[in-house]
Amino acid sequence: MNANSRGISSEGELNEGSAPSRIKPLGEGWLRSQSTALLFNTIPPERVGLSGEYDHNGLAKRVLLAFRQTFMPEEIESIRVSQRGAVVVLMGRILNQRLLVRLVTVAMDVQGAADVEINGVSAGYSLKNYLEVKPSREALLNLLKLINPS
């Protein structure tokens, strides 16, 4: 029996595909199980709580904390924050569009936020509330100019 028949070249290296039966190479199964273990030991960014623990609503809580640190209480008193996966969902009423842009910017800066849904937010006061304060004729004309810029 020569060296080549045992899977060993004349230089002392193993020939491809002919490893001795007692040596088992690490296959895809081992690598897959290691990456799966790592996957289940890592908390997704949208599920990290305020203290780094797993929290199903962690992203929403961290966004709300960022809002409280950034805005005045009266600016965000009627805003509710929830999440759908990595999407921050804002609901409620705010004073104006500028505040809405700032809220979205702050929410997107929170780690784990992939998008911000604002369908449930109404900005500004309703026309009914506006008319209840009995605006002047000049204010009504300005409103009409905004609605019909022609």
Image (cartoon, helix red, strand yellow):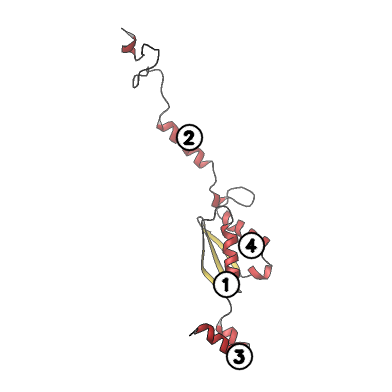
Q: Secondary structure at mark 1?
A: helix
Please say if 21 is above or below 54.
above
Residue furthest to the top? 1
Q: Is residue 31 left or right of residue 144?
A: left
Q: CA distance from mark 2 to mark 3?
A: 71 Å
Q: CA distance from mark 4 to mark 1?
A: 16 Å
Image coords of residue 95 (percent x, y): 61, 74
Q: Secondary structure at mark 2?
A: helix
In percent of the image, x 55 and y 84: which residue is there?
127
Residue situated in front as seen by the camera: 69 or 15: 15
Please say if 140 is above or below 116.
below
Image coords of residue 118 (percent x, y): 52, 67
User: Which of the marked residues, 2 or 4, is nearer the chain's N terminus?
Assistant: 2
User: Residue flagged by tag 4: what amino acid is it?
Assistant: Phe
How packed mark 3 is, by other alpha carbons closer than 10 Å (few <14, some 14-19, many 20 or more), is few
Image coords of residue 33 (percent x, y): 45, 35
How packed mark 1 is, by other alpha carbons closer than 10 Å (few <14, some 14-19, many 20 or more), is few
Q: Nearer the viewer, mark 1 or mark 2?
A: 1
Circle on res. 39: none
Q: CA distance from mark 2 to mark 4?
A: 39 Å
Q: The N terminus lies in which quarter of the figure? A: top left
Task: Report which residue position mark 2 lands on.
Answer: 34
User: Residue flagged by tag 1: what amino acid is it?
Assistant: Gln
Task: Report which residue position mark 3 lands on.
Answer: 138
Residue furthest to the front? 150
Task: Report which residue position mark 1 lands on.
Answer: 97
Q: Quadrant of residue 76?
A: bottom right
Task: Report which residue position mark 4 lands on.
Answer: 67
How packed mark 4 is, by other alpha carbons closer than 10 Å (few <14, some 14-19, many 20 or more), is many
Residue situated in front as seen by the camera: 51 or 126: 126
